[in-house]
């Protein structure tokens, strides 16, 4: 929370919003306690968090309501007043797909929603791009990571291990410091969060056509000059935002006997780059501000059996670089899903296999003020298989590995950490740790020596350590 120091210096209203369904079947309610612990900063704490934090939100706290925007029902536009002595600005974005958009990565383009007449498919395609627009022009973008919530796909997958991000939704950061010469010109400016999809192969471009419901909001973290009376000036020397290169390759196979659609296969590929470079004049002299961003996306999908079976493979990777505040690379890879819906007269059943992984190298974040040198890596991968029936009966097995490698720079002298947890039948059946290359004895499970190498492979984005290790429930 140190990066939110600017908000903690004075009294604030906290609105805790957790949606809940209560009826004659689901009768539970939440009893929540929020506790804050304050302590002296350790050497790893941010050396200089933002001086000011401004909202990019619907600002409904005055009505005791949550302040996130709903897309596409609302326009997520704000006009924050940035102080004249601002020398750095980073937007931290929250975006969560819900309702019709909870499983957006499994959706098909609009012209294929009726491929199987007895089983309409969700539309708007499997690609989402959240754009950060300054006065309507692209300044940065986010390709959201896939988040599977605790009841998602097959409920028995997530007992008790949950998918990455389910309880800690990721935030995405875009450094808009190169745009300060524009934002500080004395005129009113807008910052907008806009979600785009690739909804139709015929259109050949992205659009704001979107299902309900994306919840989005952001914080603008601002660092100011040491002189309160200073007025920052500068020049935006270069701004290049490439057109989104996106292509879809469909293949529809029909039954040779009756002519009905039997298999739909879709491949999507996308890439985009942004470069923004400015010179800012501060009280300490001129400084260069940059934001360089690039990403690539691949998705392959196959539907068969009247749309009741679906396989999905999705991979997203990219890099983000600033002039003085670090750089990072990331991979959301792989996301693999094999899902089957089994209809029956008196019940229905769900079966699925899932593998989800992500890895990050470099600084990773900028709004918290931390600058991490090269060599830092973090990765995780979870794999599970599960079966569930609507009239009772569920089985599931899940396993997750987490690995972190960093420079020896904290008070505990922790250079590496690894954790592997296995669950079956709703209980943890294996739990192992490794700190600084040495195993830590735990109460559950036994880890063989040859298994320790999987942490290193996870850090490199190699998930083969899991092949064959998670068995049918």
Image (cartoon, rainbow, N blue to C red):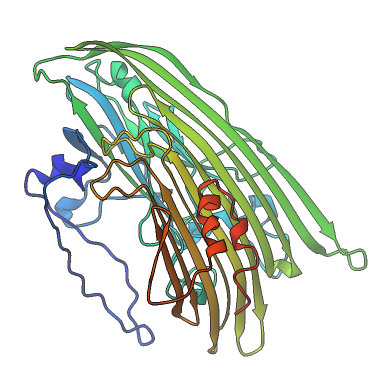
- Asked if residue 270 lies left or right of residue 379, the reply is right
Does residue 186 lie above or below 201 as drawn? above
Q: How many marks?
A: 0
Seen as rendered, the residue at the extreme right is 257
Indicate the quadrant where residue 361 lies: top left
Q: Nearer the viewer, residue 108 or 442?
A: 442
Q: Nearer the viewer, residue 195 or 279?
A: 279
Does residue 186 lie above or below 428 as drawn? above
Q: At which x and y percent is residue 346? A: 62, 90
* Residue drawn where x is 53% and y is 89% of the image: 392
Q: At which x and y percent is residue 405? A: 42, 46
Q: At which x and y percent is residue 217? A: 32, 45
* Residue drawn where x is 20% and y is 36% of the image: 49
Q: Quadrant of the C terminus?
A: bottom right
- Asked if residue 462 lies left or right of residue 445, the reply is right
Q: Nearer the viewer, residue 455 or 119?
A: 455
* Residue drawn where x is 59% and y is 62% of the image: 466
- Asked if residue 11 lies left or right of residue 445, the reply is left
Q: At which x and y percent is residue 231? A: 16, 14
* Residue drawn where x is 60% and y is 76% of the image: 350
Res 81 visible: no
Res 141 visible: yes
- Asked if residue 108 lies left or right of residue 10, the reply is right
Indicate the quadrant where residue 321 lies: top left
């Amino acid at each position: 929370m140190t990066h939110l120091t600017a908000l903690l210096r004075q009294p604030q209203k906290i609105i805790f919003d957790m949606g809940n369904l209560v009826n004659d079947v689901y009768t539970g309610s939440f009893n929540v306690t929020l506790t804050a612990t304050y302590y002296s900063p350790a050497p790893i704490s941010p050396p200089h968090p933002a001086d000011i934090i401004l909202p990019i939100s619907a600002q409904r706290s005055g009505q005791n309501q949550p302040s996130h925007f709903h897309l596409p029902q609302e326009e997520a536009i704000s006009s924050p007043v940035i102080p004249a002595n601002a020398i750095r600005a980073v937007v931290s974005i929250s975006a969560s797909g819900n309702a019709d958009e909870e499983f957006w990565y499994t959706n098909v383009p609009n012209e294929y929603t009726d491929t199987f007449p007895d089983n309409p498919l969700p539309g708007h395609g499997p690609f989402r791009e959240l754009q950060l627009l300054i006065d309507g022009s692209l300044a940065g973008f986010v390709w959201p990571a896939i988040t599977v919530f605790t009841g998602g796909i097959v409920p028995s997958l997530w007992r008790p291990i949950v998918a990455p991000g389910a309880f800690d939704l990721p935030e995405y950061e875009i450094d808009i410091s190169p745009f300060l010469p524009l934002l500080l010109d004395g005129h009113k400016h807008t910052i907008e969060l806009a979600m785009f999809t690739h909804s139709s192969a015929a259109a050949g471009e992205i659009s704001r056509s979107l299902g309900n419901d994306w919840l989005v909001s952001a914080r603008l973290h601002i660092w100011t000059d040491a002189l309160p009376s200073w007025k920052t000036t500068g020049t935006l020397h270069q701004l290049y935002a490439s057109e989104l290169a996106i292509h879809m390759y469909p293949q529809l196979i029909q039954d040779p006997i009756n002519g009905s659609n039997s298999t739909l296969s879709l491949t999507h590929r996308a890439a985009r780059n942004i470069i923004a470079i400015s010179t800012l004049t501060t009280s300490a002299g001129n400084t260069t501000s940059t934001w360089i961003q690039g990403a690539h996306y691949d998705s392959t999908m196959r539907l068969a059996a009247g749309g009741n079976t679906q396989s999905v493979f999705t991979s997203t990777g990219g890099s983000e670089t600033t002039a003085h505040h670090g750089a990072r690379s990331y991979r959301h890879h792989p996301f693999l899903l094999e899902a089957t819906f089994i209809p029956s007269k008196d019940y229905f059943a769900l079966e699925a296999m899932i593998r989800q992984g992500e890895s990050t190298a470099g600084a990773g974040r900028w709004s918290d003020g931390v600058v991490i040198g090269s060599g830092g890596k973090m990765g995780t991968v979870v794999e599970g298989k599960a079966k569930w029936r609507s009239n009772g009966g569920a089985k599931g097995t899940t396993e997750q590995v987490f690995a972190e490698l960093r420079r020896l720079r904290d008070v505990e002298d922790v250079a590496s950490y690894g954790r592997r947890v296995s669950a079956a039948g709703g209980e943890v059946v294996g739990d192992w740790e490794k700190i600084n290359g040495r195993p830590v004895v735990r109460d559950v499970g036994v880890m063989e020596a040859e298994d320790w190498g999987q942490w290193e492979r996870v850090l490199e984005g190699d998930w083969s350590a899991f092949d064959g290790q998670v068995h049918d429930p």
